[in-house]
Image: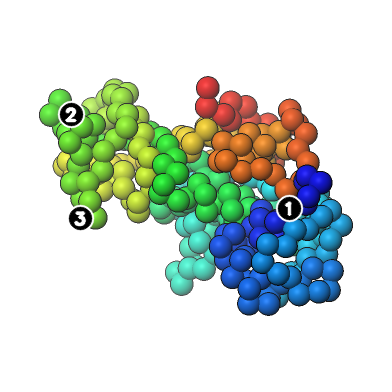
Amino acid sequence: MNGQGEKLQKVLAQAGFGSRRTMEEWIAAGRVSVNGEPATLGMRVFPGDLVKTERRTIRVGEREHAVRVLLYHKPEGEIVSRDDPEKRASVFDKLPRLRGQKWIAIGRLDFNTSGLLIFTTSGELANRLMHPRFEVEREYAVRVQGAMTEEQVDRALKEGVELEDGPVTFEKLEDQGGEGFNHWYRVMLKEGRNRIVRRAFDALGLPVSRLIRVRFGIINLPPRLKRGMTAELGEGEVAQVLDWAGLTAVSEIEAGAEGKATGRTRPSGRFKR
Protein backbone atom coordinates (compact mmCIF):
# COMPACT_ATOMS: atom_id res chain seq x y z
CA MET A 1 0.00 0.00 0.00
CA ASN A 2 1.48 3.35 -1.01
CA GLY A 3 2.04 6.46 1.16
CA GLN A 4 -1.22 8.01 -0.02
CA GLY A 5 -3.18 4.97 1.10
CA GLU A 6 -5.66 3.08 -1.06
CA LYS A 7 -9.17 4.03 -2.09
CA LEU A 8 -11.68 2.51 0.30
CA GLN A 9 -13.80 0.89 -2.43
CA LYS A 10 -10.70 -0.84 -3.81
CA VAL A 11 -9.72 -2.23 -0.40
CA LEU A 12 -13.25 -3.56 0.17
CA ALA A 13 -13.38 -5.14 -3.30
CA GLN A 14 -9.99 -6.79 -2.85
CA ALA A 15 -11.14 -8.16 0.51
CA GLY A 16 -14.01 -9.97 -1.21
CA PHE A 17 -16.99 -7.77 -0.35
CA GLY A 18 -18.02 -7.20 -3.98
CA SER A 19 -17.13 -5.13 -7.05
CA ARG A 20 -15.76 -1.59 -6.77
CA ARG A 21 -19.01 -0.20 -8.16
CA THR A 22 -21.03 -2.05 -5.53
CA MET A 23 -18.69 -0.79 -2.82
CA GLU A 24 -19.13 2.79 -4.05
CA GLU A 25 -22.89 2.32 -3.75
CA TRP A 26 -22.46 1.00 -0.20
CA ILE A 27 -20.31 4.00 0.76
CA ALA A 28 -22.77 6.47 -0.76
CA ALA A 29 -25.62 4.77 1.09
CA GLY A 30 -23.85 5.13 4.44
CA ARG A 31 -23.28 1.39 4.88
CA VAL A 32 -19.52 1.70 5.56
CA SER A 33 -17.58 3.33 8.37
CA VAL A 34 -13.85 3.88 8.93
CA ASN A 35 -12.54 4.07 12.47
CA GLY A 36 -16.07 4.63 13.72
CA GLU A 37 -16.84 7.53 11.34
CA PRO A 38 -19.11 7.36 8.24
CA ALA A 39 -17.10 6.73 5.11
CA THR A 40 -17.23 9.07 2.12
CA LEU A 41 -16.70 8.48 -1.60
CA GLY A 42 -13.07 8.92 -2.63
CA MET A 43 -11.84 8.29 0.90
CA ARG A 44 -8.43 6.67 1.30
CA VAL A 45 -7.51 4.22 4.04
CA PHE A 46 -4.20 3.14 5.55
CA PRO A 47 -2.82 0.05 7.31
CA GLY A 48 -4.38 -0.28 10.72
CA ASP A 49 -7.63 1.51 9.82
CA LEU A 50 -10.74 -0.31 11.01
CA VAL A 51 -13.32 -0.64 8.24
CA LYS A 52 -16.81 -1.78 9.17
CA THR A 53 -19.77 -2.77 6.99
CA GLU A 54 -23.08 -4.41 7.74
CA ARG A 55 -21.52 -7.80 7.00
CA ARG A 56 -18.19 -7.75 8.77
CA THR A 57 -15.20 -5.71 9.95
CA ILE A 58 -11.65 -5.74 8.59
CA ARG A 59 -8.39 -4.17 9.72
CA VAL A 60 -6.69 -2.70 6.64
CA GLY A 61 -3.39 -4.37 5.79
CA GLU A 62 -3.87 -7.45 7.93
CA ARG A 63 -2.41 -10.53 6.27
CA GLU A 64 -5.61 -12.54 6.62
CA HIS A 65 -7.39 -10.02 4.38
CA ALA A 66 -4.85 -10.18 1.55
CA VAL A 67 -6.04 -11.50 -1.81
CA ARG A 68 -6.06 -15.29 -1.92
CA VAL A 69 -6.41 -17.50 -4.98
CA LEU A 70 -7.27 -21.19 -4.85
CA LEU A 71 -7.19 -23.81 -7.61
CA TYR A 72 -9.59 -26.73 -7.49
CA HIS A 73 -9.69 -29.80 -9.74
CA LYS A 74 -13.44 -30.21 -10.02
CA PRO A 75 -14.69 -33.74 -10.58
CA GLU A 76 -17.87 -34.48 -12.49
CA GLY A 77 -20.98 -34.61 -10.33
CA GLU A 78 -20.54 -31.38 -8.36
CA ILE A 79 -22.32 -28.06 -8.79
CA VAL A 80 -20.73 -24.61 -8.57
CA SER A 81 -23.30 -23.18 -6.17
CA ARG A 82 -23.83 -22.85 -2.43
CA ASP A 83 -27.60 -23.41 -2.72
CA ASP A 84 -29.16 -26.33 -4.54
CA PRO A 85 -32.77 -27.48 -4.05
CA GLU A 86 -31.70 -30.99 -5.11
CA LYS A 87 -29.00 -31.07 -2.39
CA ARG A 88 -26.31 -32.24 -4.82
CA ALA A 89 -22.64 -32.15 -3.86
CA SER A 90 -21.16 -28.65 -4.13
CA VAL A 91 -17.61 -27.57 -4.93
CA PHE A 92 -17.81 -25.24 -1.91
CA ASP A 93 -18.01 -28.27 0.39
CA LYS A 94 -14.38 -29.11 -0.46
CA LEU A 95 -12.79 -25.68 0.05
CA PRO A 96 -10.67 -24.61 3.04
CA ARG A 97 -12.56 -22.61 5.67
CA LEU A 98 -11.95 -18.86 5.84
CA ARG A 99 -12.13 -16.34 8.66
CA GLY A 100 -13.75 -13.02 7.73
CA GLN A 101 -13.67 -13.74 3.98
CA LYS A 102 -15.42 -16.01 1.51
CA TRP A 103 -14.39 -17.92 -1.60
CA ILE A 104 -15.79 -16.52 -4.86
CA ALA A 105 -15.86 -18.77 -7.92
CA ILE A 106 -14.32 -17.24 -11.05
CA GLY A 107 -16.80 -18.54 -13.60
CA ARG A 108 -18.48 -21.92 -13.50
CA LEU A 109 -18.27 -25.46 -14.78
CA ASP A 110 -21.46 -27.40 -15.30
CA PHE A 111 -22.42 -30.51 -13.34
CA ASN A 112 -20.91 -32.96 -15.85
CA THR A 113 -17.74 -30.99 -16.62
CA SER A 114 -14.47 -31.48 -14.74
CA GLY A 115 -11.18 -29.63 -14.58
CA LEU A 116 -9.76 -26.31 -13.45
CA LEU A 117 -11.92 -24.10 -11.27
CA ILE A 118 -10.46 -20.96 -9.68
CA PHE A 119 -11.61 -19.30 -6.47
CA THR A 120 -10.54 -16.00 -4.95
CA THR A 121 -11.36 -13.83 -1.95
CA SER A 122 -11.24 -10.73 -4.16
CA GLY A 123 -14.57 -9.64 -5.61
CA GLU A 124 -12.72 -7.22 -7.87
CA LEU A 125 -10.46 -9.92 -9.33
CA ALA A 126 -13.44 -12.24 -9.86
CA ASN A 127 -15.46 -9.54 -11.62
CA ARG A 128 -12.53 -8.52 -13.81
CA LEU A 129 -11.82 -12.06 -15.01
CA MET A 130 -15.47 -12.88 -15.62
CA HIS A 131 -16.23 -9.71 -17.59
CA PRO A 132 -16.64 -10.46 -21.33
CA ARG A 133 -14.45 -7.49 -22.27
CA PHE A 134 -11.45 -9.10 -20.58
CA GLU A 135 -11.66 -12.06 -23.03
CA VAL A 136 -9.94 -14.62 -20.84
CA GLU A 137 -8.69 -17.65 -22.76
CA ARG A 138 -10.37 -20.90 -21.71
CA GLU A 139 -8.87 -24.15 -22.92
CA TYR A 140 -10.62 -27.54 -22.84
CA ALA A 141 -9.93 -31.18 -23.64
CA VAL A 142 -13.08 -32.47 -25.35
CA ARG A 143 -14.05 -36.06 -26.15
CA VAL A 144 -16.85 -36.35 -28.69
CA GLN A 145 -18.79 -39.15 -30.31
CA GLY A 146 -17.56 -39.12 -33.87
CA ALA A 147 -14.91 -37.04 -35.65
CA MET A 148 -14.95 -33.59 -37.24
CA THR A 149 -14.80 -33.16 -40.98
CA GLU A 150 -12.45 -30.59 -42.55
CA GLU A 151 -15.50 -28.44 -43.31
CA GLN A 152 -16.59 -28.52 -39.67
CA VAL A 153 -13.10 -27.60 -38.44
CA ASP A 154 -12.97 -24.69 -40.89
CA ARG A 155 -16.42 -23.56 -39.80
CA ALA A 156 -15.55 -23.70 -36.09
CA LEU A 157 -12.34 -21.70 -36.59
CA LYS A 158 -13.45 -19.14 -39.19
CA GLU A 159 -17.17 -18.73 -39.82
CA GLY A 160 -18.33 -19.70 -36.35
CA VAL A 161 -20.88 -22.24 -35.15
CA GLU A 162 -24.37 -20.76 -34.94
CA LEU A 163 -26.09 -21.07 -31.54
CA GLU A 164 -29.41 -19.72 -30.27
CA ASP A 165 -27.63 -16.93 -28.37
CA GLY A 166 -25.22 -16.04 -31.18
CA PRO A 167 -22.30 -17.67 -33.02
CA VAL A 168 -19.18 -19.03 -31.33
CA THR A 169 -15.74 -19.22 -32.92
CA PHE A 170 -12.88 -21.28 -31.50
CA GLU A 171 -9.53 -19.49 -31.29
CA LYS A 172 -7.74 -22.84 -31.49
CA LEU A 173 -8.82 -26.38 -32.35
CA GLU A 174 -6.38 -29.29 -32.34
CA ASP A 175 -7.06 -32.91 -33.23
CA GLN A 176 -5.81 -35.12 -30.38
CA GLY A 177 -6.80 -38.44 -31.96
CA GLY A 178 -8.86 -41.23 -30.49
CA GLU A 179 -9.96 -44.84 -30.68
CA GLY A 180 -13.17 -46.31 -31.97
CA PHE A 181 -16.18 -44.02 -31.91
CA ASN A 182 -14.64 -41.47 -29.51
CA HIS A 183 -12.34 -38.66 -30.59
CA TRP A 184 -10.43 -36.07 -28.53
CA TYR A 185 -9.92 -32.41 -29.42
CA ARG A 186 -8.19 -29.52 -27.66
CA VAL A 187 -10.12 -26.27 -28.07
CA MET A 188 -9.61 -22.70 -26.88
CA LEU A 189 -12.06 -19.82 -26.84
CA LYS A 190 -12.33 -16.42 -25.17
CA GLU A 191 -15.81 -16.45 -23.73
CA GLY A 192 -17.70 -18.32 -21.05
CA ARG A 193 -21.32 -18.54 -22.10
CA ASN A 194 -23.27 -21.31 -20.39
CA ARG A 195 -22.34 -24.78 -21.70
CA ILE A 196 -20.87 -23.15 -24.81
CA VAL A 197 -18.42 -25.95 -25.73
CA ARG A 198 -21.05 -28.67 -25.39
CA ARG A 199 -23.60 -26.65 -27.35
CA ALA A 200 -21.11 -25.90 -30.14
CA PHE A 201 -20.26 -29.57 -30.68
CA ASP A 202 -23.93 -30.56 -30.38
CA ALA A 203 -24.69 -28.08 -33.16
CA LEU A 204 -22.08 -29.85 -35.29
CA GLY A 205 -23.74 -33.21 -34.61
CA LEU A 206 -20.95 -34.41 -32.33
CA PRO A 207 -22.24 -35.01 -28.76
CA VAL A 208 -19.66 -34.40 -26.01
CA SER A 209 -19.00 -37.43 -23.81
CA ARG A 210 -16.23 -35.87 -21.69
CA LEU A 211 -15.22 -32.24 -21.09
CA ILE A 212 -12.23 -31.07 -19.03
CA ARG A 213 -11.09 -27.47 -18.56
CA VAL A 214 -7.30 -27.50 -18.59
CA ARG A 215 -6.51 -23.78 -18.57
CA PHE A 216 -8.09 -20.47 -17.59
CA GLY A 217 -6.07 -17.44 -18.72
CA ILE A 218 -2.46 -17.81 -17.56
CA ILE A 219 -3.34 -20.57 -15.08
CA ASN A 220 -3.00 -24.22 -16.11
CA LEU A 221 -4.59 -27.18 -14.36
CA PRO A 222 -1.52 -28.51 -12.48
CA PRO A 223 -0.70 -32.04 -13.73
CA ARG A 224 -0.31 -33.40 -10.19
CA LEU A 225 -3.51 -31.86 -8.83
CA LYS A 226 -5.86 -34.82 -8.66
CA ARG A 227 -9.64 -34.57 -8.91
CA GLY A 228 -11.26 -33.25 -5.73
CA MET A 229 -8.05 -31.57 -4.54
CA THR A 230 -7.23 -27.88 -3.95
CA ALA A 231 -3.99 -25.92 -4.19
CA GLU A 232 -3.57 -22.35 -2.96
CA LEU A 233 -1.29 -19.98 -4.87
CA GLY A 234 1.59 -18.41 -2.99
CA GLU A 235 1.91 -14.64 -2.63
CA GLY A 236 4.29 -14.32 -5.58
CA GLU A 237 1.91 -16.30 -7.78
CA VAL A 238 -1.05 -14.19 -6.64
CA ALA A 239 0.97 -11.11 -7.59
CA GLN A 240 1.40 -12.55 -11.10
CA VAL A 241 -2.34 -13.13 -11.41
CA LEU A 242 -3.18 -9.61 -10.18
CA ASP A 243 -0.64 -8.10 -12.57
CA TRP A 244 -2.08 -10.11 -15.47
CA ALA A 245 -5.57 -8.88 -14.55
CA GLY A 246 -4.37 -5.28 -14.37
CA LEU A 247 -4.82 -5.06 -10.60
CA THR A 248 -2.48 -4.59 -7.65
CA ALA A 249 -2.53 -6.32 -4.30
CA VAL A 250 -3.82 -4.50 -1.22
CA SER A 251 -1.11 -5.95 0.98
CA GLU A 252 2.61 -6.06 0.26
CA ILE A 253 3.54 -8.98 -1.98
CA GLU A 254 6.79 -10.87 -1.69
CA ALA A 255 7.83 -12.03 -5.13
CA GLY A 256 8.68 -15.68 -5.52
CA ALA A 257 6.80 -16.99 -2.49
CA GLU A 258 5.95 -20.68 -2.54
CA GLY A 259 2.37 -21.94 -3.00
CA LYS A 260 0.60 -24.15 -0.48
CA ALA A 261 -1.18 -27.31 -1.59
CA THR A 262 -3.73 -29.28 0.34
CA GLY A 263 -4.34 -32.99 -0.09
CA ARG A 264 -0.70 -34.13 0.27
CA THR A 265 0.67 -32.83 -3.00
CA ARG A 266 2.37 -29.68 -4.22
CA PRO A 267 1.32 -29.10 -7.86
CA SER A 268 3.70 -27.60 -10.36
CA GLY A 269 3.31 -26.11 -13.82
CA ARG A 270 0.48 -23.79 -12.80
CA PHE A 271 1.21 -20.95 -15.22
CA LYS A 272 1.08 -20.87 -18.97
CA ARG A 273 4.46 -20.81 -20.65
Residue 84 spot, x, y in % from top left: 48, 68
Tell me which residue sits at (81%, 46%) in the image: 3
Q: Residues within 10 Å of mark 2 (few under 14, many from 20)?
A: some
Kind of residue sitting beneath label 3: Glu
* Numbered circle sitting on residue 165: none
User: Along the polypeptide, which appears first: circle 3 or circle 1?
Assistant: 1
Q: Is residue 29 above or below residue 57?
A: below
* Residue 147 figure quarter: top left
Residue 221 spot, x, y in % from top left: 52, 34
Q: Label 2's element?
A: helix
Spatial separation of the CA atoms under disc 2 and disc 3: 20 Å
Residue 167 spot, x, y in % from top left: 22, 46
Q: Label 1's element?
A: strand
* Residue 99 figure quarter: bottom right
Kind of residue sitting beneath label 1: Glu
Residue extending furthest left?
151
* Numbered circle sitting on residue 154: 2
Kind of residue sitting beneath label 2: Asp
Side of 172 relative to 47 (left or right): left
What residue is pinned by disc 3? 164
Q: Is residue 95 above or below residue 227?
A: below
Residue 16 spot, x, y in % from top left: 65, 58
Q: Residues within 10 Å of mark 1 (few under 14, many from 20)?
A: some
Spatial separation of the CA atoms under disc 1 and disc 2: 49 Å
- Work out whether residue 147 or residue 167 is closer to the camera in this orientation and state it: 167
Q: Label 3's element?
A: loop
Between circles 1 and 2, the one closer to the viewer is 1
What residue is pinned by disc 1? 6
